[in-house]
Image (spheres, rainbow, N blue to C red):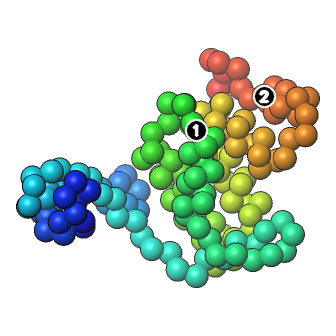
Amino acid sequence: MRCPKCASIEDKVIDSRISREGNTIRRRRECLECGHRFSTTEVLVRDGLVVIKRDGRREEFSREKLISAIRAACHKRPVDIEQMGMLVEDVVDMLEAQYDNELPSRAIGQGVMQRLRAIDQVAYVRFASVYKEFRDVSEFMQEISSLPKIGDEP
């Protein structure tokens, strides 16, 4: 890995941790040139996944595009990047088991919303507003009223 401080490719791994689900590995590294410490995350590469859009178009699945949408929904919310990464991995694992290599965009959105709802309700409503294409405030209110009240069981 290239050091983010000095750009050297000489480093050593100090610590490795496998995620709870075993889908990612987080490594703590130290640059042998400047001594800077940094973290990297290894993720299973999934080749050949195709998203079937609502209008029937097909495009290559982009983990980065999905994490970007989730990051926008979670902006200034108490959801860390690791939770977002695990959310994406959980959704993709579930979809691969159910659909093989062609993933309907509707199923991706539903999977993300289901998990976001349990993590952060504000992020859920933000994501749902884009995914469900809310047209006015009444649609927001209807979605918000469907959420469990504080203290209720999810």
Q: Is residue 11 above or below residue 85?
A: below
Q: Is residue 49 above or below residue 142?
A: below
Give the mark nearest the N terminus, 1 or 2: 1
In the image, what residue occupies the spot 8% across and 61% down? 32
**20 relative position to 61: left or right:** left
**136 relative position to 108: left or right:** right
Q: Around disc 2, counting alpha carbons within 10 Å, would you say few (fewer than 14), some (14 to 19), or many (20 or more)?
A: some
**63 relative position to 10: left or right:** right
Front residue of 123/107: it is 123
Q: Assign the N terminus to one quadrant of the image.
A: bottom left
In the image, what residue occupies the spot 77% across and 60% down? 106
Could you say which quadrant of the image residue 33 lies in?
bottom left
In the rendering, at what x and y percent does residue 107 appear?
73, 61
Could you say which quadrant of the image residue 14 lies in?
bottom left
Could you say which quadrant of the image residue 141 lies in?
top right
In the rendering, at what x and y percent does residue 112 appear?
65, 51
> Given this view, does label 1 or label 2 mark the residue nearer the observer?
1
In the image, what residue occupies the spot 67% across and 54% down? 111
Q: Assign the C terminus to one quadrant of the image.
A: top right
SS at badge 1 = loop
CB atoms of marks 1 and 2 within 8 Å:
no
Q: Around disc 1, counting alpha carbons within 10 Å, would you say few (fewer than 14), some (14 to 19), or many (20 or more)?
A: many
Would you name the residue on which mark 2 appears? 144
Q: Is residue 124 above or below residue 8?
A: above
Q: Is residue 29 visible?
A: yes
Q: Amino acid at mark 1?
A: Cys
Would you name the residue on which mark 1 appears? 74
In the image, what residue occupies the spot 64% across and 76% down? 60
Q: Amino acid at mark 2?
A: Ile
Q: Is residue 28 visible?
A: no
Front residue of 106/28: it is 28
